[in-house]
Image: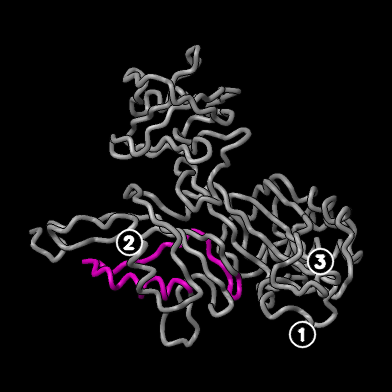
């Protein structure tokens, strides 16, 4: 009993962020069997074989993308079980090893983090953001820069009615049954989703377009944020908004399409091409600090604290106070009061910040979820302070779940 190959070995679970250009792949998920098509997951798991885990490594991907769709930052969790006596890989070593052994140049591992053994990359995600890129003024595909092909949807029209597109997008915001924007083959049991954000904006001129061409071409971005999306929901919403921008559909009709819940209606045959779509970011509630820098909360304005799963404290950007004396009284106590100076009230109701504000010197078994200004981060891991900074946070509001 216990004498198997895994006896005495330690299993470590990691959250890994990675990016890819989807042009060469049959989506993010692995393609099994003798088929010639391959997914991003195939290459990631092939690279993970070099880790020599006792148990084969499998990537559980947070967000599945279709063939041709790109990802600025996708996520997955994986378990690595090293032989007995060998410590778990550090996140940095794991990242370097995977990148070293990746055989496809269009995939890159961005960052890795140790997470609890029950963490699940798909179900723990609290926010997913997709970006769709359009270009107008391109009557023929061969008139588009070779560096932009397969990275945007080229429209023959010279302009779009952006005001109408934004009006139509407002009808999609909120919690609705999005059946009308769902393609057949979706595994979801419910078609109700909450769309938190839908925006249409003009992009600066592409750096990959010649100056004489930039006067003719205009690039546009559509962004959609939700906790989760239905199969091809973003591409179908994009297609409808483009139809509005071209004058083929009115904003009022978009509301009627949504309320019809009919995926086979007159206008629902439109699906935007896959090659203009990018998965921009995946965020995780209590692990919001985990991820590429572009996905982290900004260090200016209001920031939402997510150190504690029950806390929703809002704090303003910090002001550094290097003259504060080191006061052990303000060291964090795990989950009783995550970080008093950060205004993270945790499970303690009605507790106000001290006056004057205390220095922020967190020591906690879990990493802090907030950056602390330009270059200043109050980080804590395994009870040791990795970066000691003093700062002043102004508590503006808080609520409990």
- Who's the residue at 77% across and 55% down the image? 200
Residue 330 horizontal/vertical position (percent): 37, 20
Q: Is residue 286 visible?
A: yes
Q: Which residue is mark 2?
A: 94
Q: Is residue 262 visible?
A: no
Q: Label 1: few (<14), some or many (≥20) within 10 Å?
A: few
Q: Which residue is mark 1?
A: 142
- Who's the residue at 40% across and 71% down the image? 44
Residue 306 horizontal side relative to residue 59, left or right? right
Residue 33 horizontal/vertical position (percent): 41, 83
Evaluate if marks 3 and 2 touch, with contact meaning CB atoms under 8 Å apart. Answer: no
Residue 134 horizontal side relative to residue 163, left or right? left
Residue 261 horizontal side relative to residue 129, left or right? right
Residue 54 highlighted magenta (yes or no): yes
Disc 3 versus disc 2: distance between alpha carbons?
Answer: 41 Å
Disc 1 versus disc 3: distance between alpha carbons?
Answer: 16 Å
SS at circle 1: helix
Q: Residue furthest front?
A: 323
- Who's the residue at 35% across and 49% down the image? 115
Q: Nearer the viewer, residue 56 or 47?
A: 47
Q: Which residue is mark 3?
A: 218
Residue 388 highlighted magenta (yes or no): no
Residue 385 horizontal/vertical position (percent): 33, 35
Point out the stretch of residues depicted in magenta.
40-69
Which sits earlier in the primary sequence, circle 1 or circle 3?
1
Compared with 295, 275 (above or below) is below
Residue 262 horizontal/vertical position (percent): 76, 62
Compared with 2, 155 (above or below) is below
Disc 1 versus disc 2: distance between alpha carbons?
Answer: 42 Å
Which sits earlier in the primary sequence, circle 1 or circle 2?
2
SS at circle 3: strand
Which sits earlier in the primary sequence, circle 3 or circle 2?
2
């Amino acid at each position: 009993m216990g004498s198997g190959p895994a006896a005495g070995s330690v299993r470590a679970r990691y959250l890994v962020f990675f990016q890819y250009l989807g042009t060469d792949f049959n989506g993010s998920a692995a393609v099994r069997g003798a088929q010639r098509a391959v997914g991003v997951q195939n290459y990631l798991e092939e690279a993970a074989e070099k880790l020599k885990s006792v148990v084969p490594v499998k990537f559980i991907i947070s967000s599945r993308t279709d063939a041709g769709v790109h990802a600025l930052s996708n996520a997955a969790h994986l378990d690595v079980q090293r032989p007995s006596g060998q410590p778990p890989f550090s996140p940095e070593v794991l990242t370097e090893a995977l990148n070293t052994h990746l055989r496809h140049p269009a995939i890159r591992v961005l960052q890795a983090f140790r997470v609890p053994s029950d963490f699940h990359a798909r179900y723990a995600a609290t926010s997913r953001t997709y970006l769709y890129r359009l270009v107008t003024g391109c009557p023929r595909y061969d008139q588009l820069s070779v560096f932009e092909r397969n990275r945007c949807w080229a429209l023959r029209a010279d302009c779009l009615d952006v005001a109408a597109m934004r009006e139509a997008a407002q009808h999609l915001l909120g919690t609705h049954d999005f059946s009308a924007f769902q393609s057949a083959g979706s595994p979801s049991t419910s078609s109700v989703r909450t769309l938190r954000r839908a925006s249409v904006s003009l992009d600066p001129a592409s750096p990959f377009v010649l100056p004489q061409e930039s006067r003719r071409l205009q690039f546009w971005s559509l962004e959609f944020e939700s906790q989760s999306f239905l199969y091809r929901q973003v591409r179908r919403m994009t297609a409808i908004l483009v139809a509005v921008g071209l004058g083929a559909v009115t904003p009022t009709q978009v509301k009627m399409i949504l309320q019809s819940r009919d995926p086979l209606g007159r206008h629902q045959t439109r699906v935007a091409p896959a090659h203009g779509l990018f998965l921009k970011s995946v965020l995780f509630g209590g692990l919001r600090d985990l991820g590429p820098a572009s996905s982290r909360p900004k260090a200016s304005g209001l920031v939402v604290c997510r150190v504690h799963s029950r806390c929703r404290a809002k704090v303003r950007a910090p002001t550094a106070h290097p003259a504060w004396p080191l006061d052990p009284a303000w060291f964090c106590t795990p989950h009783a009061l995550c970080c008093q100076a950060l205004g993270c009230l945790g499970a303690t109701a009605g507790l106000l910040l001290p006056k004057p504000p205390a220095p922020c010197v967190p020591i906690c078994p879990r990493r802090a979820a907030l950056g602390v200004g330009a270059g200043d981060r109050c980080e804590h891991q395994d009870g040791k302070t990795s970066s000691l900074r003093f700062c002043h946070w102004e508590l503006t509001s808080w609520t409990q779940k």
